[in-house]
Image (cartoon, helix red, strand yellow):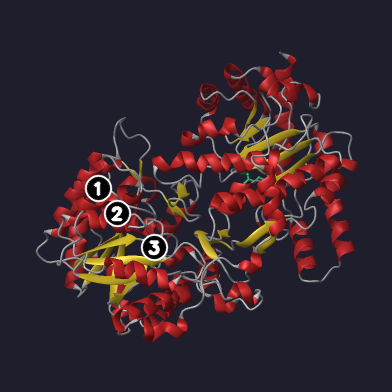
């Protein structure tokens, strides 16, 4: 009974990777220095895993930026615009851009909060095996071997690599990256032969795309790729690792290939167990790597359940290896570092380091019998002490909260605003001064009164500026918020916070998600004081600003002892109370942001409806208590609604603002086709770029929008919040935006 993990965090316990990488970018550290830091981190990981007693240790799980980007470099899928650059310069330019060169796109890694760098593949992308010295997986394998540790290099598998790529700009219509499967597989074949030559026993090929719906053509491609790799005369043994869900139709396909091992996720994909049984198991020649320790969440494993799962898998393969459900990249490193947590909670948590011990423990229990580890099995189950009976009773009584009055009726009762009202998405630039005031307050260097004075002064400035610019619906600017989820999580019961619990989001950007561990309740209003202060400084309406229930879950680690839907309702109830209090305080416009609505969408289409049902239900519970005269806004940071388009209307907000930099027209028509009848604010300029668009450009955008939407339903706003920009860009851009709105208004 062997043990393994599919991957491990690479950022270091004190964010060493970020510090070294940023120092390198700033010219404070040379390439050799960065490499030394990287080597130290790799060694730490291997040592940790070896000392913990993990049997099969992965390598090439380290990356200076991203594992997909590493693959692109490894197979030489480097677009022409980076070809004049070399080595690290080319590598980081692909991730972040360089002088005059746009970076590759970045997008979410499945339904996680990790972002990968999207390969650009065109018909003339010529895959190539790198020179021996450049082959990172071989170098890392040798490096570990030099330390006396035998490892299993991890690569993104060829199917996932291509299905996660996008066609290079200018590719002929109909071209798909998957068209290049055969030449890519030849490059993998050569790499595998070289790895074998270096002494590698096992290689892990990650194929997470198998957890999503796959067409017959894609399954055929899977078969072709692994038949070819399986039949190589000289190669390491192959583990095809799948994760993030059930692989369904892909299971019999993989099982029929010659790969020696298959990894299945039994946490996100419990149905994998039954599917295995249905095909009569993998047979005596194959190893099953059973992902029974959750790599996506921070809870201790219910070891009895994990052992039970493993026991039920015995006989379904030649050998069984106990593993993590996916790479541990998605959880923080070590809960032992968190000394400030409520001990009742701390005892329930396991970060990457603890999960490694769990894997080893389950392996030992299966070898030596449960008794051998009995004293190390903690209690599992619902935490009685974190139940809030009042919240539960109120939710039971509320049901779905009853629908709001109909849109036309609400509209008549709401604020009188000019046609094409102008507004912003919420945050204004977070200046050094604002950040310093927050940090000083947190550290106790300034008292509450001084902090309040600093924030109020900032709100004064932001209100005065908006009045001067001539916006119609103002915001307070969110200076008091470090992060739109953390701010609320810190004010709600049931959420805890870590000090060192960083997780890589992309490159050197790490996040520290709050932990939603118990029933959520709102001890007191969270935003009312700031919002009403802002309202007291102006006669224009000020929009209150809240973060929606789905987003509050998506960007946190969330309890698993009850359905997500139930947890979402608890958050929604807290927001509903906040909406009520804002109304009572005279606020007539309230925005509930849901930028993560699409992100939590399940990987399988068949699961979409159930998800959207509770997601929409939670939003409505949060907002439908509002009076007809209160205008509810929502905001999403994307324009490609795809599978959530029907849900946008079902949220029943009065106004929806969205990103629209790319496809303004189609978006509005799509929404219309989906039956969306409320107002819409398609962003008229892209806040992700420092460029200041002129009034003509935005006027043009508005006229385009008016082709698809009646003037009395159109709002004018930027794409997203302004907190990452500076005033030097924001002020002229907003002035131009208001000018554009006025010009168009004058012609209506
Ligand atoms: N109100 C938030 C802001 O303006 C919304 C952020 C977001 O959409 N991600 O910053
Ligand atoms: Zn946004």
Can residue 369 be seen in this snapshot?
Answer: yes
Query: Looking at the image, can residue 417 be seen?
Result: no
Which label's residue is closer to the chain start, 1 or 2?
A: 2
User: Which residue sits at x=32%, y=66%?
Assistant: 290
Where, by quadrant of the figure, is residue 520 drawn?
bottom right
* Image quarter hosting the C terminus: top right
What residue is drawn where x is 21% and y is 62%?
A: 191
Q: Residue 195 carries which label?
A: none
Give the x, y percent position of residue 515: 60, 63
> Marks 3/1: CA distance?
31 Å
Assess disc 2: are there few (<14), some (14-19) or many (≥20) residues with their C-alpha within 10 Å of its C-alpha. Answer: some
Residue 380 x, y percent position in the rendering: 51, 71
Distance from disc 1 to disc 2, alpha carbons, whole Å, reads 7 Å
The answer to whether marks 3 and 1 mark residues whose Cβ atoms lie closer than 8 Å is no
Q: Are marks 2 and 3 in contact (CB under 8 Å)?
A: no
How far across and down, in percent of the image, does residue 237 sit? 19, 68
Q: Residues within 10 Å of mark 1 (few under 14, many from 20)?
A: some
Q: How far is disc 2 from disc 3 in space, using C-alphas? A: 27 Å
Q: Mark 3 points at which residue?
A: 326
Label number found at residue 76: 2
| Circle 1 SS class | loop
Tag shown at residue 126: 1
Question: Closer to us: mark 3 or mark 1?
Answer: 3
Q: Are marks 1 and 2 in contact (CB under 8 Å)?
A: yes
Quadrant placement of the N terminus: bottom left
Residue furthest left as drawn: 233
Callout 3 secondary element? loop
């Amino acid at each position: 009974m062997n043990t393994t993990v599919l991957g491990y965090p690479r950022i270091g316990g004190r964010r060493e990777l970020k510090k070294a990488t940023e120092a390198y970018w700033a010219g404070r550290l040379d390439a050799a220095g960065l490499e030394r830091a990287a080597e130290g981190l790799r060694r730490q990981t291997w040592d940790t895993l070896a000392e913990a007693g993990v049997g099969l240790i992965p390598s090439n799980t380290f990356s200076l930026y991203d594992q997909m980007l590493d693959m692109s470099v490894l197979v030489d899928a480097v677009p022409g615009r980076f070809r004049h650059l070399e080595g690290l310069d080319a590598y980081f330019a692909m991730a972040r851009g360089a002088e005059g060169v746009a970076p590759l796109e970045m997008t979410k890694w499945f339904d996680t909060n990790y972002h990968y760098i999207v390969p650009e593949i065109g018909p003339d992308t010529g895959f190539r095996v790198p020179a021996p010295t450049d082959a990172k997986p071989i170098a890392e394998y040798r490096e570990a071997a030099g330390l006396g540790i035998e490892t299993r290099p991890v690569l993104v598998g060829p199917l996932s690599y291509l299905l996660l790529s996008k066609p290079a700009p200018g590719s002929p219509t109909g071209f798909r990256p998957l068209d290049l499967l055969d030449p890519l597989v030849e490059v993998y074949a050569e790499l595998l032969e070289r790895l074998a030559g270096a002494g590698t026993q096992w290689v892990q090929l990650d194929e997470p795309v198998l957890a999503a719906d796959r067409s017959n053509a894609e399954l055929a491609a899977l078969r072709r790729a692994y038949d070819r790799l399986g039949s190589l005369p000289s190669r390491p043994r192959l583990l095809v690792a799948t994760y993030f869900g059930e692989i369904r139709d892909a299971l019999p396909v993989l099982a029929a290939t010659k790969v020696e091992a298959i990894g299945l996720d039994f946490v996100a994909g419990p149905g994998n167990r039954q599917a295995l049984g249905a095909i009569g198991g993998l047979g005596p020649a194959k190893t099953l790597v059973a992902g029974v320790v959750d790599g996506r969440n921070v809870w201790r494993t219910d070891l009895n359940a994990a052992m039970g799962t493993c026991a039920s898998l015995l006989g379904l393969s030649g050998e069984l290896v106990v593993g993590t459900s996916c790479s541990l990249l998605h959880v923080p490193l070590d809960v032992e570092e968190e000394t400030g947590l409520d001990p009742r909670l701390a005892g329930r948590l396991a970060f990457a380091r603890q999960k490694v011990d769990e894997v080893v423990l389950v392996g030992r229990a299966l070898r030596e019998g449960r008794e051998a580890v009995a004293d190390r099995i903690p209690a599992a189950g619902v935490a009685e002490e974190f139940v809030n009976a009042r919240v539960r009773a109120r939710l039971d009584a509320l049901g779905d909260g009853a629908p709001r009055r109909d849109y036309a009726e609400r509209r008549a009762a709401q604020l009188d605003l000019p046609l094409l009202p102008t507004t912003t998405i919420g945050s204004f630039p977070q200046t050094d001064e604002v950040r310093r005031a927050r940090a000083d307050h947190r550290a106790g260097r300034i008292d509450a009164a001084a902090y309040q004075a600093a924030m109020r002064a900032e709100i004064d400035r932001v209100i005065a500026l908006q009045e001067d610019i001539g916006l119609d619906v103002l915001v307070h600017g969110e200076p008091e918020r470090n992060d739109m989820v953390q701010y609320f999580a810190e004010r709600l019961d049931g959420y805890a916070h870590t000090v060192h619990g960083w997780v890589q989001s992309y490159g050197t950007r790490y996040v520290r998600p709050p932990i939603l561990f118990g029933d959520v309740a709102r001890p007191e209003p969270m935003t009312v004081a700031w919002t009403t202060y802002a309202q007291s400084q102006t006669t224009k309406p000020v929009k209150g600003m809240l973060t929606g229930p789905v987003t509050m879950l998506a960007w946190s680690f969330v309890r698993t002892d009850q359905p997500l839907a139930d947890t979402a309702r608890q958050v929604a109830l807290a927001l509903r109370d906040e909406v009520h209090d804002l109304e009572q305080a005279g606020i007539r416009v309230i925005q509930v942001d849901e930028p993560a609505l699409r992100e939590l969408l399940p990987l399988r289409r068949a699961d979409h409806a159930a998800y959207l049902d509770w997601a929409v239900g939670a939003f409505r519970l949060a907002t439908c208590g509002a009076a007809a005269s209160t205008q509810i806004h929502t905001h999403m940071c994307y324009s490609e609604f795809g599978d959530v388009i029907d849900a946008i209307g079902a949220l029943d907000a009065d106004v929806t603002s969205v990103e629209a930099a790319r496809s303004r027209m189609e978006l509005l028509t799509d929404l219309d086709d989906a039956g969306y009848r409320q107002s819409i604010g398609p962003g008229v300029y892209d806040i992700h770029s420092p460029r200041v668009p002129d009034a003509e450009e935005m006027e043009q955008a508005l006229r385009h929008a008016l082709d698809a939407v009646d003037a009395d339903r159109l709002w004018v706003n930027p794409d997203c919040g302004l907190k990452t920009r500076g005033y030097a860009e924001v002020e002229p851009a907003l002035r131009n935006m208001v000018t554009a709105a006025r010009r168009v208004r004058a012609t209506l």
